[in-house]
Image: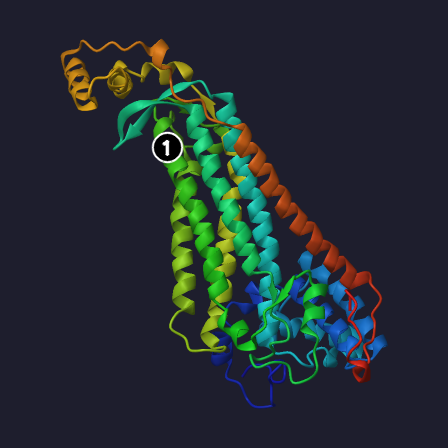
Amino acid sequence: MAAEGSQLWAKDLPLHQAIHRFTVGEDPIDDLNLLPWDAVGSAAHARTLAWHGHLPLPEAFALVQALKDLHGEALAGKIEIRPEQEDGHTALEAALVERTGESGKRIHMGRSRNDQVILALRLYTRDTLVQIGLQVADTAKAFLALAARYKDVAMPGYTHMRRGMPSSWGLWGAAFAEGLIEELEALQGLLGRLDRCPSGAAAGFGAPLPFDRATMASSLGFSKVQRSPIDVMNSRGRHEGAVADWLASVAGVLERAFWDLALFSMEELGFVALPDAFTTGSSIMPQKRNPDVVELSRGTCRKLRGQAALVHEIAGGLPSSYHRDIQLLKGAFIGTLKTASGMFAVLPALLEGITVNATKCAEACSDDLWAAHEATALAMQGMPFRDAYKIVGKQVLDGSFHPDRATFGVSSTPDLEAPASELQALAQSLRDRQSAWNAAVELLWTAPIAVFSLSNSNSSSPEVP
């Protein structure tokens, strides 16, 4: 039998050990990621209870101070969630009771584990997303730096894995920077939809006591309240799916770069050399250097698509409100965020260490790459393009085509200033969000705890409860 009475819902009834292990699942591990944010949300909840007079001021103060300590300990990995405690919420409340006595038993008034976990997940997600966004911005910056270093180095532009037109490393690097900038713009909208505080929804039908949800939201740095308590529950999986889809979309931008680098670094092409620190050797072939980081990153892009599909599958096909199936979302979703962050963390250094072999690239730029330029030049002189196309095509076939490369040039020079400016603004926007949220959390620990008189319900609420 499992330890009885350890769970928040325990009613002194027996619990089979195997059933306990199955229902608990990976929560004691997954919830370690949420514990710091559960402490933050609980501090805001304690302040809001005190604001309404549901919690004596000295007890609220003691709870907030204990939660501040627990927040720091959770960040440092010093808190354990024991299997019999079931989840992080139980471990946190048990720690509060141990440190504050009877006050710790009052913290759950007016809330359910349902809105408690959603709030912790929302806080964790927005913070992690901003960190990932800054990693993506650093990667885009590294692509722009590579483009600037080699902007005039010619290379073949490929379609169907065949040489088509002249390109350059400037165009290549700028392309992936532009793609990541688009994804960072999309991230702004994603953070906007997460900018709604779910606290106060309780089990999905509202808290059974007066509760100022707007004040609670403001104290946590949210600009809005997620108004419908039923929608709060229904949004489990919806928001996680949107985040996972965004990560998969970013991976879709990068996957092509990884493919290109794997191909361009082959001995037969030799366009680029990968930094030695990002390659490994063979266990039997002494001469081998394998592009493991590039290949693993390419595989990770596919993994992120699979993880997004898993998130959608777990959350799909459920009726309104909370159902235990949704517990499985936590591990799948947190795993997706960790997968993405782990990959994005190494990419700037990889790109900074790449060297381009201009000689090899030039050797691959044969005359036929300028065939479209020549046909277009003839058409601009008045010849129908289709006739010019046929004439140049015949010249290429019979070996008489010798374009004036100096006239046509290599390719259009990429604009690197505009994307750099946009990237800087997007990164600054993320840092501003992060600073605002950090400031809100700091106020939770340090601002005085006020009390709101229910008999004076027309009084305006302060910005910090």
Is 416 placed left or right of 42 in the picture? left
- Estimate the x, y position of residue 267 in percent, counting from the top left: 34, 23
Here the colouring is rainbow
Residue at the disc numbered 1:
260
Would residue 140 be visible to someone looking at this image?
A: yes
- Quarter of image, res 460: bottom right
Is 136 placed left or right of 171 in the picture? right
Identified at 75% across, 67% down, the residue is 67
- Quarter of image, res 410: top left
Up-down relation of residue 201 to residue 157 (above or below): below
- Estimate the x, y position of residue 279 in percent, counting from the top left: 45, 32
Identified at 68% across, 70% down, the residue is 214
- Quarter of image, res 82: bottom right
- Estimate the x, y position of residue 292 in percent, counting from the top left: 42, 37
Identified at 41% across, 75% down, the residue is 318
Circle 1 Cα neighbour tier, 10 Å, few/some/many (<14 / 14–19 / ≥20): few
**Amino acid at circle 1:** Asp
Q: Nearer the viewer, residue 350 or 141?
A: 141
Numbered disc total: 1
Would residue 32 be visible to someone looking at this image?
A: no
